[in-house]
Image (cartoon, rainbow, N blue to C red):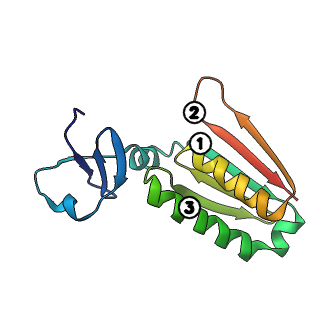
Amino acid sequence: MGHEAALCKKCGALYRNKRWTVAGEEAGAGNLAKVVCPACQRMADNNPGGIVTFAGDYLLAHEDAILNSIKNIEAKSRAKNPLGRIMEISQDKNVLTIATTEDKLAQKLGREIFKAHRGELHYRWSHGESFVRVSWFR
């Protein structure tokens, strides 16, 4: 992509000045190139940039509050960076697993839940890739 603007044909994110933003009114300007943004591509390839696991009995006792926090953190983050998204949320008993399109969002989810609920927080990076595994336990 050159310096021109482009629009993601899947989510509507706008690429301009070398960065992705949430498209506003100007997105309807018609002559924008239609592309697939990196986040939509990751989702299509099922290739997350981060995996966050929240585990422990505390999680079960505070499940609704923690899930609401996670959704709010993603919404706020997405307003600034539309490429950071939750791909999938799955739960198996007292383990909640979240796949994200970017490592930064995975870290932020772990950090914010840790700040609000304490517990233990660990990060594990994959060598040479921008992939992180974040685990929180309480």
Labels 3 & 1 near each other (Cβ < 8 A): no
Residue displayed at 59% across by 44% down: 104
Horizontal side of residue 102 vs 6, given as left or right: right
Residue lying at the far front in this picture: please name it: 17
Residue 135's spot in the image, x, y percent?
77, 48
Q: Secondary structure at mark 3?
A: helix
Horizontal side of residue 133 vs 2, given as left or right: right
Which residue is the site of mark 2?
A: 130
Q: Secondary structure at mark 2?
A: loop
How far apart marks 2 and 1 lie (CA) works out to 6 Å
The disc at residue 81 is none
Labels 2 & 3 near each other (Cβ < 8 A): no
Which residue is the site of mark 3?
A: 74
Residue 4's spot in the image, x, y percent?
19, 39
Q: Earlier in the sequence, mark 2 or mark 3?
A: 3
Q: Amino acid at mark 3?
A: Glu
